[in-house]
Every structure is written in structure tokens, then in C-alpha cells.
Image: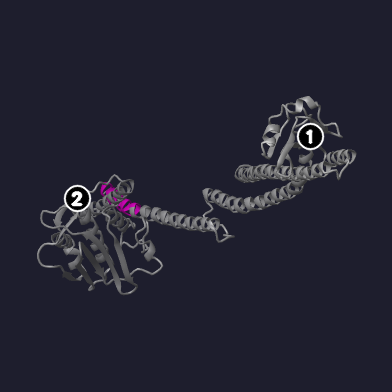
Amino acid sequence: MAKSLFARMLVVYLLIILLAFSLLGGIFFETLKNQFLDTQMNTMVQNSQIINDWWGQYYDGKLSDDDFQGLLLKKAAADHTVIWLIDAFGRAFLYDPLGQSNIDKASVNSADFISDAMNNTVVKRISNVNSSFKDTVMTVAIPLKLGDTIQGAIVVHKAVKDVEVGINAIFRQVFIPLLISVAFAAILVLILSRYIVRPIKDISYAAGELSRGNLDWRVTPKTNDEIGELALSFNKMAEELKIQDGLRNTFIANVSHELRSPLTSVQGFIQGMLDGAIEPEDRDKYLQIVLSETKRMSTLITDLLNLAKIESGKFPMEYSQFDLNELLLRCLLTFEQRINEKQLEVGINLPDGKMLVWADEDRISQVITNLIDNAVKFTPPGGELKVWTQTAENKVYVSISDTGEGIPVEDQPYVFERFFKVDKSHSQNKPGTGIGLSIVKRIISQHGERITLQSVPGKGTTFTFSLTRAFEGHQTK
């Protein structure tokens, strides 16, 4: 995990941070550079205006020729600039005390910005002025005026690299905090990545423990975020697996007992007949017992096969319209002998006429048979069995109740689970493997309906399931 998810997250986060800072830094630097150059050229324009004032003083005789020349040379040297003065006759005066250019006076007027300046236009540009300078320069040109009269042009050049020194100094002041921010962000990413990955590693380790059969292993949630929810969901899954494992073990024990008991009886009786231990006149009685036991095994195997088919989806529903009242009465008649043997009181409350429903009649018959069988099985002699229906909108609700022992509260959530059996004693009076109600629940679910349970320990149990009503000539799933 540390070499995969953690490393990937760390690399991705760092790449995002570096790309973001690089993009922002590049935009910032370019914007800063453009603004700085523009500021410098505006300053050069202001300096050109100062030169223009000196020209006025020189023209009025307030400055001597030497003084004027000296001011221009000092100005050019102090500002690291090259100054050109071009009069109305095209004569050029070049002031380059630092020797930054190699242009001669005759070539000055060839620059196109000279004519622009003499046309009363302020020119700003960055170029090499026809390769006259060693490096790229900023050039500012303004008209040389005396009052409102244009008498020539003032041109000031300054090397861009001199400006970039200042820009780089500013950039260093910004870049160092930027690097510190990146380092701080990387530390935060490192902490965040471990914060996310560590609980995932714990869950991964716990999953490995479950795969090795340690169903008691749990994860301790350390946060209240999605990772914490994942840990809680994992623990819930582990608990369900433990419950299912317990149900599976119980089922194996139940099935083993239910198969071993009749097989032992059958084997014993047949062996007795073959050995002559059973008298010929008693053979019919024991053959009936053998037949009963084989039927019980056949029922068990049939239930197992039906459950397997339902869970695999190979148990197709054949919907039809049928009378639910008639089906309920028909199913009750099949239990008449057992009801009479236990002297049960039967209460039936069905509406007059037909109660048409849209469902698989054979499967619903199986549901009703299982529920009545459970009610008869768990109702003590002299108890009461009730069957009734209720309608609401397009639904009919079938309820089957008994006055038996009831189901313990702690067992009620698992009654419909496969392999679950409330009676753990394997009593011969209450045979079964806990498959019947699981089949019932899945048949009802395949119909898109619901089945509910109400049980009070010591008073009895009521199962209620819903079906969709149908009307004459109306067929709807």
C-alpha cells in the first residue's frame, strides 16, 4: 500500500501543486515584467520631458552649450541610457557615455520612430533598433518642442537587461516565499496522504484476517469522515459474515441430523427384516415407518433444491389470475388431519365472493403451505390457528397466526435467513431445517411483495404477506 496508493497520491498531489505554482508563477512573472517595463518607459518619457525643458532653457540662452551638453551626458550616464536629439534639419546629436550603441549620426534618421515623434506622437517600443545595440533596448521617442512648435525629436534608449536586474530582484523576493509555500504544501500533502492511507491499510489487513477465517477481527474507526464510514461498513460486513457462518454451521448440523436420523431408522428396520429380527406380521408396520422417513428425506432434499433454484434465479414465476380465498381453503384442507389430531381451533375470516390476485399460484400455494405448517407445528394441543385477509387499494394482505411459543426477540431479525432455526433442540416433534421461511421470503420478494412478522414470546406469532389484486379480465404484473 505504501508503495502504491500512498506514493501515487503523494506524487499526484505534488505534481498538482508544482504545476499550479509554476503556472501562477509564470503568469505573475510575465505580468510583473510587462508592468515593470511599462513603468520604466513611462519614467523614460518623464525624463525626456526634462530634457525638453533643458532644451528650452538652452534655446533661451539660460544654459550654455557646454552646460547643456554636460547635463545630457550626466543624465545618460546616471540612468544608463543613450540619448538622441534630432533637430528640425535632421541633424542628430548622440549622447552615449557608456558606449552602448554603435550607430552613427547619419543613420539615426532612418529609424521610423523619428518621424512618428516629429508628428507629435509619443513612441514606446522594445527592439534592437536595427541591430545598433548589443542587447534589446527600450526606446522612448517624444517630439522636441519649443512652446507649441515641434523642433525635432528626443529619443531615449535603455537596455532591457538593466531593467531585468530589478525584475529578477523582485522575483527572488517572491520566489523564496513561493518555495517555502510549496515545501509547506508538500508536508501537508504527506500528512494528508498518510491520514487517508493508514486507515485503508488497517481495513486491508482486516480483510486479510477475514479471508483467513478470523471472523472476530474488527477495524477501529478513527475519523467521522468517509474513511470512518468505510470502517463501520466493513465491521458491519464482518458481523454479517460471522452471523452467516454461524447459520451455515447450524444448517449443516440441522441437515446432518435430519438426514442421519431417518437414514439410521431406515437402515435399522431394513437390517432387522433381512436378519429376521422383525416378525413377518410386523413388517407392514415398519415398512410404513420406512416410507414416512423416506418422504421426510425427500421433502428436505426438495426444499434444498428449491432454495438453490430460487437463489440462482432459475425459479421462473408463472403469473396468472386466481382466487386467493379458494387457494387458502384448499391449503387448509391438506392440514385437516394434523389440526384434528392436535384439536386446534381454526378461525377463518375471508371476504365473501372471489378475491382475485395476480401471482404464481403454485409458488403462493407453497408460501401458504409453509406458513400453515409452521403454525400447526408450533401451536400446542388445544391452541388456535387463524387465517384472514385484508385489502388496501390494489393490495391484499394475508395473515396466518398461531398461539404457540412465539419467537424470541433476539431471533426475530434472522427468522427469514436461510439455514436459521429457532428450535435448536432437533426435537422430533418439530422437525425442520429452517429452510421453509427462507423459501417463503424469497418467493414473496420475487413477486415484488413484502412479508412481515409479529411475535410475542409466550403468546404466538403472526406472518403477513402482500399480493397484488387483480380484476376480471385484468392482468398486470
Q: Is residue 412 visible?
A: yes
Q: Is residue 172 magenta?
A: no
Q: Are marks 2 and 1 in contact (CB under 8 Å)?
A: no
Magenta span: 259-275
Please tell me which residue is depicted at 54% across the width and 53% down the height of the picture: 214
Dominant SS of magenta comes to: helix
Q: Could you tell me which quadrant the N terminus lies in?
A: top right
Q: Nearer the viewer, residue 178 or 145?
A: 145
Relative side of 379 to 171, left or right:
left
Relative side of 252 to 401, left or right:
right
Residue 229 drawn at (x, y percent): 52, 58
Residue 253 drawn at (x, y percent): 40, 55
Q: Nearer the viewer, residue 58 or 365?
A: 58
- Residue position for label 1: 84
Callout 1: SS: strand
Residue 34's tag is none
